[in-house]
Amino acid sequence: MPKEAYTPWITRVIGYLIDIVPAAVVLGIGAGIAFGTADNQCVSNGGQYDYGVDCTSSMTAFGLIIYILAYALVAVYAIWNWGYRQGTTGQSIGKSVMKFKVISEKTGQPIGFGMSIVRQLAHIVDSIVCYIGWLFPLWDAKRQTLADKIMTTICVPADQVALNPQPLPPQPPPVE
């Protein structure tokens, strides 16, 4: 397939940014509540040289609970979006907005829940050496990141049919 048949790097980046917006909003609200309700203590250190005031801040139980709930909600969202949704349809929220999907290079089908989670974890490899793996789609013939190469996945436009699917094994005749 020509390089143009695969999803461009900038489209993938925008899709990823769309995917993380809900998580960032939830974490921002959780952090805002947690730090906004924190218990602040300030004491004057009025010694011989009077250096001013020392302040400490600690989260309240309510703030800590909200912060933990925000992280739990983001974890559930990530598993649903990048595990279930992307694994079963080939598209996370960001990928569907940007109209592309991630599929198996071998079968041309979505990779399934478990492999989609493993693919997300494989993106750690993209970050190991100065995040260079994330830039591979800029020069790679199939526009794959290192994680895509490890998982044998490709990103293609959503309306594109399977590229080179392997034939299904023979099926038994229907029972009448």
Image (cartoon, rainbow, N blue to C red):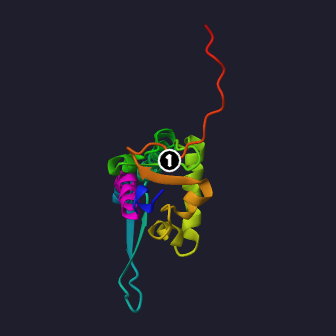
Could you say whether the residue bearing mark 1 is in a helix, strand or loop?
loop
Lateral position of residue 139 relative to residue 49, left or right: right
Q: Which residues are magenta?
A: 9-29
Mark 1 is on which residue type? Leu
Q: Position of residue 20 (x, y in %)?
A: 39, 55
- Which of the two residues, 175 or 109, is positioned nearer the viewer here? 175
Classified by dominant secondary structure, the portion drawn in magenta counts as: helix
- Which of the two residues, 154 or 22, is positioned nearer the viewer here? 154
Lateral position of residue 150 relative to residue 103, left or right: right
- Which of the two residues, 77 or 149, is positioned nearer the viewer here? 149
Within 10 Å of disc 1 (Cα), the crowding (few <14, some 14-19, many 20+) is some
Tally of numbered discs: 1
* Residue 126 quadrant: bottom right
Q: Position of residue 79 (x, y in %)?
A: 51, 45
Look at mark 1 in the image and give the residue it sits on.
163
Q: Position of residue 157 (x, y in %)?
A: 39, 50
At 57% from the left and 43% from the top, the residue drawn is 107
Can residue 67 be seen from the camera position used here? Answer: no
In the image, is residue 155 above or below residue 79?
Answer: below
Lateral position of residue 162 relative to residue 49, left or right: right
Lateral position of residue 22 relative to residue 135, left or right: left
* Residue 6 quadrant: bottom left
Taking the magenta stretch, the answer to whether it contains residue 14 is: yes
Q: Position of residue 118 (x, y in %)?
A: 60, 51
Can residue 128 be seen from the camera position used here? Answer: yes
At 41% from the left and 63% from the top, the residue drawn is 9
Task: Report the quarter where the C terminus lies.
Answer: top right
**Direction bottom: furthest residue:** 49
Taking the magenta stretch, the answer to whether it contains residue 84 is: no
